[in-house]
Image: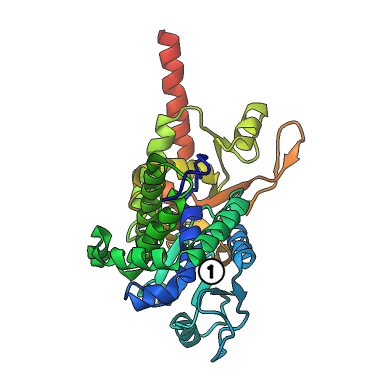
């Protein structure tokens, strides 16, 4: 390898790492096909909301992807090392979606936000983006350009590395599917480039980071594609979290004092009226952290929606929250966002309502302080 030119470590979030690897896979796809390491069909990128979807599409376009506004065409003028990206809409025919994703002349990518159609849950190269990319876009663009310059100037090194991947340990993980193997090949190839300008320890750390991003991506797609059979564990997780966190306030929509106003603004309060609880998404995320490795927060929100307990207007666009106009005791009005959950979700059977749990926690703390 050449002499190290820089030592600054590049750091990518999980979603950013996956997006970089997707573009690398597209760049080297002709060689992946030759070595039977190809991911076999196009990719479905499911984004948590429209904002993530828009940033993702913008990134792909800046990196050189072609925009495919309609997927009904039989021929495309797209180079075989580039991505053709399509923003899914509800009028797209299922048959045409499958045909588009089967194209091997380029790498087809479909971006979809909000709710994943049932036919896209099985047999697809599905990647779920929960965070997307925020400030890392320019770094990724520069990194990918430098990577492309390197491999185009070193084609024999690239071919050798891809060929060696056929005997790599991850190649035996066929149960994880062809997309997993292709992503790992892309990571191997990227780290050959990365080693040129970084030391051995930094390069090893980068390889581990990319491997973890791949595993996280595969697991997230698997758990999101599964329909949750019960929402009982969600209710229990939220109740346990509220019981264990006395700082969370429970208050009536029409009785918001100054202290409760601050708690609402800090997303540390649950409000209620006669029919609904209004819960900040932050509380649901915190409550569900204990099982995030097996169930995604997207799956949790979708399960609440499918069960009829979560009420919202724009779930198809990835927005599970609603804005609620509030006016506190001092006449100050504001409109925070909440998950709007039917009260029956927490008050069924012998379960206490959240307001009762809140009073119970407050009373316990008060007694402890008095005793002290």
Q: Quadrant of residue 326?
A: top right
Q: Nearer the viewer, residue 50 or 125?
A: 125
Q: Nearer the viewer, residue 126 or 12?
A: 12
Question: Quick check: 249 above or below 273?
Answer: above
Q: Residue furthest bottom?
A: 74
Decide: few, some or many residues near mark 1? Use Cα within 10 Å; few <14, some 14-19, many ≥20: many
Q: Residue at x 45, y 22 (%)?
A: 363
**Residue position marked by numbered label 1 in the rendering:** 112
Q: Is 217 left, or right, of 62 in this rendering? A: left
SS at mark 1 in the image? strand
Q: Residue furthest right?
A: 331
User: Which color scheme did the rendering employ for the protein?
Assistant: rainbow
Question: Quick check: 189 above or below 360?
Answer: below
Whole-percent x, y for residue 95 in the image: 46, 87
Whole-percent x, y for residue 18 in the image: 46, 58
Quadrant containing the C terminus is top left
Q: Residue at x 35, y 55 (%)?
A: 215
Q: Quadrant of residue 76?
A: bottom right
Question: Quick check: 40 above or below 369?
Answer: below
Q: Nearer the viewer, residue 298 or 81?
A: 81
Q: Quadrant of residue 202?
A: top left
Q: Is 155 left, or right, of 135 in this rendering? A: left
Q: Nearer the viewer, residue 173 or 331?
A: 173
Residue 273 appearing in the image: yes
Q: Residue at x 27, y 60 (%)?
A: 170
């Amino acid at each position: 390898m050449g002499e190290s030119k820089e030592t600054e470590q590049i750091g990518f979030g999980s979603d950013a790492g996956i997006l970089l690897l997707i573009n690398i896979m597209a760049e080297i796809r002709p060689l992946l096909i030759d070595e039977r390491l190809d991911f076999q069909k196009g990719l479905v990128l499911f984004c948590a909301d429209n904002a993530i979807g828009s940033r993702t599409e913008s990134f792909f376009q800046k990196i050189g992807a072609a925009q495919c506004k309609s997927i009904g065409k039989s021929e495309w003028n797209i180079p075989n090392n580039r991505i053709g990206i399509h923003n899914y809409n509800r009028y797209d025919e299922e048959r045409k979606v499958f045909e588009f994703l089967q194209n091997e002349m380029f790498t087809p990518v479909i971006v979809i936000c909000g709710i994943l159609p049932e036919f896209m849950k099985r047999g697809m190269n599905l990647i779920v983006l929960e965070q997307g990319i925020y400030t890392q876009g320019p770094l990724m663009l520069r990194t990918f350009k430098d990577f492309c310059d390197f491999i185009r100037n070193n084609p024999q090194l690239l071919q050798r590395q891809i060929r060696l991947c056929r005997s790599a340990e991850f190649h035996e993980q066929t149960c994880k599917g062809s997309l997993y193997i292709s992503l790992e090949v892309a990571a191997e190839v990227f780290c050959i480039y990365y080693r040129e300008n970084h030391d051995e320890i930094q390069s090893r750390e980068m390889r581990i980071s990319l491997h973890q991003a791949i595993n996280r991506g595969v697991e997230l797609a698997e758990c999101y594609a599964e329909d949750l059979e019960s929402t009982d564990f969600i209710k229990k997780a939220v109740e346990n979290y509220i019981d264990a966190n006395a700082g969370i306030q429970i208050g009536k929509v029409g009785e918001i004092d100054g202290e409760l106003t601050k708690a609402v603004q800090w997303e540390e309060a649950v409000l209620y009226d006669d029919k609904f609880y209004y819960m900040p998404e932050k509380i649901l995320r915190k409550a569900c952290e204990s099982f995030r490795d097996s169930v995604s927060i997207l799956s949790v929100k979708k399960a609440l929606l499918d069960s009829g307990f979560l009420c919202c207007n724009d779930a198809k666009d990835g927005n599970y929250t609603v804005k609620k106009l509030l006016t506190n005791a001092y006449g100050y009005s504001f409109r925070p966002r909440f998950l709007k959950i039917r009260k029956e979700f927490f008050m069924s059977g012998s379960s206490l309502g959240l307001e009762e749990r809140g009073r119970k926690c407050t009373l316990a703390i008060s007694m402890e302080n008095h005793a002290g």
